[in-house]
C-alpha cells in the first residue's frame, strides 16, 4: 500500500534514472510470467472502453458516480484497482490525492493515510483501503464471479496468490525500484533514507536477484499450465500481478 506524505511526496525521477533498476529487476523474470501478465492486462481491460463510454454518458447527464476512488497515479498498488474498476465496468470517479493523504480532511476519513481508498455507502465506516481488499469487496458486491470465483477452492487459490504477492514478491519489487524512483522506503527497511549508501545498494542488488524465485512460483504453481491464475479467464490476482510486472517493466 502506498504511503505518501506532503513532505516526502516527490514526483518519480526522470525515466533515465529508473531504467537501470527496472531493466535489472526484470532480467530474471520468467518470460512466460511476463507474457501471462500482459495477456491478463489486455483480457481484463477489454470491457474498459465500454465502461469509459458508459461513465462518460453518466457524467454528461449530471449523475454522480456511485463509487469514488482516491488514488496515486505512480503507484502499482493503485494501478491494479484502477484497472479492475475499468475492467469490471464499474461506475466510478477518480481523485488524485498525491501529496494530500496527510491532510486533515483525508485523515478524518482515512487515519492510515493510505491510497487507494474507495468511498462506498455500503461500508461500515464508509471507506476502504488496501488494493486487494478493495477488489475482493467490489467483486463480492457486484457478483463478479469471473474475476473472483465463489467456489471455495478456486477462491482460496486467488487469495493465496494475492497474499503471496503482497507478502513476498512486492517487498522485493519495492526494494529494487523505490530508490531509483525517489519513493520513500518503508520504515525499518535497510533501504530507508537514513541507511548508509552501501547498505542501500546491497539491499537493492539482493532484492533484484530475489525477484526471480517468486515469479517462478507464479508460473509453475499458480498458473500451472493455465493461461491465467484464474484459469481460462483473468482474476483479480492476475490483475494484481500484471500491474506489478508492468511497474517493473
Image (cartoon, rainbow, N blue to C red):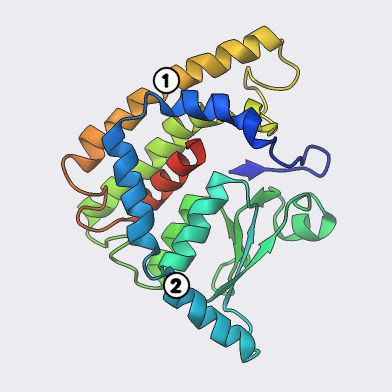
- Please name the residue shown 49% across and 82% down the image: 54
**Image coordinates for residue 97, horizontal then vertical, percent:** 72, 56
Looking at the rendered image, the disc whose residue lies closer to the viewer, 2 or 1, is 2
Q: Which of the numbered marks, if any, corresponds to residue 210?
A: 1
**Image coordinates for residue 112, horizontal then vertical, percent:** 68, 48
- Please name the residue shown 59% across and 79% down the image: 65
Between 102 and 238, the residue placed more toward the observer is 238
Q: Which of the numbered marks, if any, corresponds to residue 169?
A: none
Residue at disc 2, secondary structure: helix
* Residue 217, above or below 241: above
**Image coordinates for residue 24, horizontal then vertical, percent:** 48, 23
Question: Quick one: label 2 or label 1, which is nearer the N terminus?
Answer: 2
**Image coordinates for residue 116, horizontal then vertical, percent:** 60, 54
Where does label 2 land, which residue?
Answer: 49
Q: Kindly indicate the quadrant of the structure image that contains residue 29.
A: top left
Image quadrant holding the N terminus, namely: top right
Furthest toward the left, the residue is 225
Amino acid at each position: 500500500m502506498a504511503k505518501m506524505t506532503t513532505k516526502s511526496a516527490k514526483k518519480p525521477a526522470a525515466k533515465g534514472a529508473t531504467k537501470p533498476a527496472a531493466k535489472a529487476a526484470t532480467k530474471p523474470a520468467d518470460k512466460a510470467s511476463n507474457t501471462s501478465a500482459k495477456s491478463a492486462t489486455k483480457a481484463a481491460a477489454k470491457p474498459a472502453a465500454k465502461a469509459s463510454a458508459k461513465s462518460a454518458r453518466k457524467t454528461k447527464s449530471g449523475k454522480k458516480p456511485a463509487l469514488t476512488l482516491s488514488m496515486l497515479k505512480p503507484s502499482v498498488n493503485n494501478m491494479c484497482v484502477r484497472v479492475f474498476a475499468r475492467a469490471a465496468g464499474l461506475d466510478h470517479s477518480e481523485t488524485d490525492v498525491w501529496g494530500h493523504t496527510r491532510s486533515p480532511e483525508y485523515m478524518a476519513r482515512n487515519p492510515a493515510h493510505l491510497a487507494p481508498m474507495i468511498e462506498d455507502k455500503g461500508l461500515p465506516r464508509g471507506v476502504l483501503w488496501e488494493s486487494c481488499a478493495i477488489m475482493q469487496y467490489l467483486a463480492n458486491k457486484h457478483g463478479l464471479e469471473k474475476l473472483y470465483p465463489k467456489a471455495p477452492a478456486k477462491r482460496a487459490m486467488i487469495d493465496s496468490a494475492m497474499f503471496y504477492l503482497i507478502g513476498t514478491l512486492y517487498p522485493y519489487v519495492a526494494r529494487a525500484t523505490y530508490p531509483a524512483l525517489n519513493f520513500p522506503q518503508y520504515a525499518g527497511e535497510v533501504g530507508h533514507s537514513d541507511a548508509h549508501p552501501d547498505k542501500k545498494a546491497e539491499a537493492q542488488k539482493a532484492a533484484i536477484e530475489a525477484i526471480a524465485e517468486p515469479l517462478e512460483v507464479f508460473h509453475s504453481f499458480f498458473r500451472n499450465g493455465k493461461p491465467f491464475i484464474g484459469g481460462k479467464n483473468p482474476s483479480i490476482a492476475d490483475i494484481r500481478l500484471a500491474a506489478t510486472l508492468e511497474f517493473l517493466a
